[in-house]
Image (tube, helix red, strand yellow):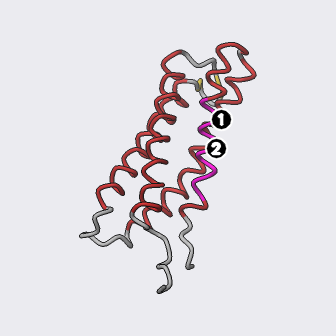
Amino acid sequence: MRHPLHPALVHFPIACWSLATAADLASLAWGEPAWRFAGILLLAGIGFSIPAMLAGLLELAKVAEDNPALKDVNRHMLMVMGALSCYMASLFLRLHGTHFIEPGLLAIGLSVLGFLCLGVAGWLGGKLVYGHRLGVSPLPPA
């Protein structure tokens, strides 16, 4: 495949997790319908993140050890792992067996922290593509 798979897959967990954080914040005013929706979105985002992260690891294997982008690649990966950890912890705090319960402030706070990590990871991902030109085809000679 000539086009990296990772950029195509990241939209799903980003959308789910971003909407989950918005639903968590909305649940402070709207209650149960919003926090139940947030729980479902957290679960979906975690599920969608696995193939996106695996595709990212495949792309990482293509980066040379002496590439100056490697520092930003590692930062990107750490921020994504931070987001995943926050969202997983938030999910576990709102589970009672297999049922969702109302999230406390810690679960909502972890969702917000996960969103902040996700934002930094996205910014670093953009830097990898637009700044370091990772995964971009070489420009034809002028």
| Quadrant into which the N terminus falls | bottom right
Q: Residue furthest right?
A: 33
Looking at the image, which residue is at 67% across and 23% down?
Answer: 35
Q: Bounds of the magenta span? A: 9-21
Circles 1 and 2 in contact, beta carbons < 8 Å: yes
Q: Residue 87 lies in magenta, yes or no?
A: no
Is 99 above or below relative to 14? above
Image quarter for residue 81? Answer: top left
Q: Residue at x 40, y 44 (%)?
A: 79
Determine the secondary structure under disc 1.
helix
Asked if the magenta segment contains residue 16, the reply would be: yes
- 103 or 29, nearer to the observer: 29
- The residue located at (50%, 63%) in the rendering is 55
Residue lying furthest front: 142
User: Hey, which quadrant is residue 64 in on the image?
Assistant: bottom left
Q: Which residue is mark 2?
A: 15
Residue 8 or 97: which is nearer the viewer?
A: 8
Q: Nearer the viewer, residue 115 or 123?
A: 123
User: Identity of the amino acid at label 1?
Assistant: Leu
Q: How many marks?
A: 2
Furthest-left residue in view?
Answer: 66
Residue occupied by mark 1: 19
Residue at point 67% right, 35% down?
40
Under mark 2, the amino acid is Ala
Residue 102: x %, y % from top left: 63, 17
Residue 7, percent from left and from top? 56, 61
Tell me residue 116's x, y (percent): 47, 34
Camera-nearest residue between 110 and 118: 118
123 relative to 1 in the view: left or right: left
Residue 82, relative to residue 61: is it above or below? above
